[in-house]
Image (cartoon, rainbow, N blue to C red):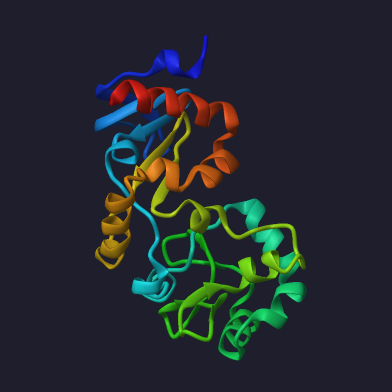
Amino acid sequence: RGLGDVYKRQIIKLRVSKCKNNRKFLYYFCGMFQLGKTIVSEDLIEKDFVCNLSQCKGECCVSGEAGAPLDKEEVSILKEIYPKVKPFLRKEGIREIENQGTSIISDFGELETPLVNNSECAYLIFNEKNTALCGIEEAYNKGVIDWKKPISCHLYPVRVKDYSEFAAVNYHKWDICSDACSLGKELQIPVYKFVKEALIRKFGKDWYTELEKVAKEYK
């Protein structure tokens, strides 16, 4: 059956096996629906969002206390493409990448991009308008590499958390993105449409097609 057949707009209870003192934990999700092996927040359909770089100046790449989340495959990709990306980066970023590595493991055991001054991403660059951009994406746009950027960055403001039996797909609300929320509302573009390309990259075209069906039914 199609992914859309498992759509359930209700409170969903799932049992998740997790190795920790040989115990199993129950996770509860409210305002979410099941789509294949993913549990998706209704916020992706309900909330509107369009990045407004002219207002926020790319603050999401500057603020925060952690780098962009990475998966194991992306760690290898960053090592491979770094020589090609390096010419696009700031000297501060290059220094931290070459001191810390193209990726790091955080104090919580998570794979992330390194930071400069424990703040902005080491792969961040600024344009002539002092707007923060991704140096990796700049290299991609110039045709130097064929990998756009980490999927966590591409998906933002959507966050994906992988568990043993499913992936949780959530909307991450951050006050620095208030201008994006306002622009999204003005243009009437929901989160899932804004990150369409990234969602297809992550889950595939069939998954996204089923999400569109759910959104149409939801309305």
- Image quadrant assignment for residue 41: top left
Determine the residue positioned at 48% across, 59% down: 110
Residue 98 can be seen in this image: yes
- Image quadrant assignment for residue 167: top left
Q: Nearer the viewer, residue 186 or 190?
A: 186
Residue 113 relative to residue 13: left or right:
right
In the picture as drawn, the residue positioned furthest to the front comes out as 187
Q: Vertically, is 84 above or below 153?
A: below
Determine the residue positioned at 59% across, 68% down: 103
Q: Nearer the viewer, residue 111 or 89?
A: 89
Residue 61 relative to residue 146: left or right:
left
Question: Where does the image place residue 64, in percent across and percent down from the top left?
Answer: 36, 71
Residue 64 can be seen in this image: no
In the picture as drawn, the residue positioned furthest to the bottom comes out as 91
Determine the residue positioned at 49% across, 19% down: 3
For the image, the number of numbered tags is: 0
Determine the residue positioned at 72% across, 72% down: 82
Quadrant, the C terminus: top left
- Image quadrant assignment for residue 142: bottom right
Question: Where does the image place residue 153, in percent across and percent down from the top left?
Answer: 50, 58
Question: Where does the image place residue 49, in percent across and percent down from the top left?
Answer: 34, 52
Residue 104 relative to residue 44: left or right:
right
Question: Where does the image place residue 191, in percent across and percent down from the top left?
Answer: 37, 45
Q: Nearer the viewer, residue 47 or 163?
A: 47
Q: Vertically, is 153 above or below 96?
A: above
Q: Nearer the viewer, residue 24 or 162?
A: 162
